[in-house]
Image (tube, rainbow, N blue to C red):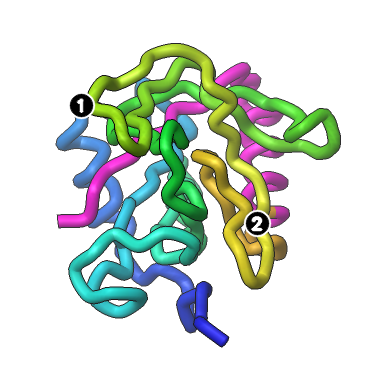
């Protein structure tokens, strides 16, 4: 069976991750809760070398506040290639508390920019790009940002707790490409 989960969590340092934020013009003073996703974090060690694979937890997600820095394995790509399926374009977004498919606590990006398989234009709007959990053998993504189940509940619980504590209705999410 193909391994879809890295053997360990992302090892980037807080300084490495805050550099992504600074390069995008973000800082913790203006955005007290930052979520930073890195597409292709395991670009050289999982899947086909130097290729952005799908249906693998080969990306990384970092939760950063003034006092916290936590890393998670994730997937920021759709599970499969299919004409018209959405992929989030790198950039800065706002995410709010949501219920994934009306069932469980999640986050949803309020206004997003997506590219679609087989198309050249970028669509702007609210396309239902959620942060939610995936499966053990499949990332369960039609364009959403998914996590292995146990890591998802740690991520979701931490984000909701921070949002409540800091009285934040939305959090800032930055998606970048691994260089």
Structural distance between the alpha carbons of marks 2 and 1: 31 Å
Q: Mark 2 points at which residue?
A: 134
Q: Name the residue under label 1.
A: 25
Closer to viewer: mark 2 or mark 1: 2
Farthest residue, direction right: 103
- The spot of residue 23 in percent (x, y) is 15, 36
Residue 154 found in image quarter:
bottom right
Q: Does 114 sit above or below residue 140?
A: above
Indicate whether residue 161 is drawn in magenta: yes
Bounds of the magenta span? 153-179
Indicate whether residue 168 is drawn in magenta: yes
| Residue found at x 52% / y 16% | 126
Can residue 27 be seen in this snapshot?
no
Which secondary structure, mark 1? loop
Dot 1: few (<14), some (14–19), or many (≥20) neighbours within 10 Å? few
- Marks 2/1 in contact by CB < 8 Å: the verdict is no
Q: In which quarter of the image is the C terminus?
A: bottom left
| Residue found at x 71% / y 64% | 150
Left or right: 156 as drawn, with respect to 55: right
- The spot of residue 28 in percent (x, y) is 36, 32
């Amino acid at each position: 069976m193909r391994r879809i989960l890295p053997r360990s969590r992302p090892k980037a340092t807080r300084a490495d991750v805050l550099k992504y934020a600074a390069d995008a013009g973000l800082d913790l003073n203006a955005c007290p809760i930052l979520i930073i996703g890195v597409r292709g974090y395991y670009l050289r060690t999982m899947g086909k070398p130097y290729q952005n694979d799908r249906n693998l937890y080969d990306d990384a997600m970092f939760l950063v506040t003034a006092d916290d820095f936590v890393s998670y394995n994730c997937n920021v790509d759709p599970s499969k290639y299919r004409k018209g399926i959405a992929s989030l374009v790198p950039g800065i977004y706002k995410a709010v508390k949501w219920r994934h498919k009306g069932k469980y606590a999640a986050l949803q990006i309020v206004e997003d920019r997506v590219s679609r398989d087989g198309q050249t234009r970028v669509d702007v709007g609210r396309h239902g790009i959620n942060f939610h959990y995936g499966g053990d053998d499949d990332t369960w993504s039609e364009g959403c940002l998914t996590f292995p189940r146990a890591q998802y509940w740690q991520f979701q619980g931490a984000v909701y707790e921070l949002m409540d504590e800091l009285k934040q209705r939305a959090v800032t999410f930055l998606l970048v490409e691994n260089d």
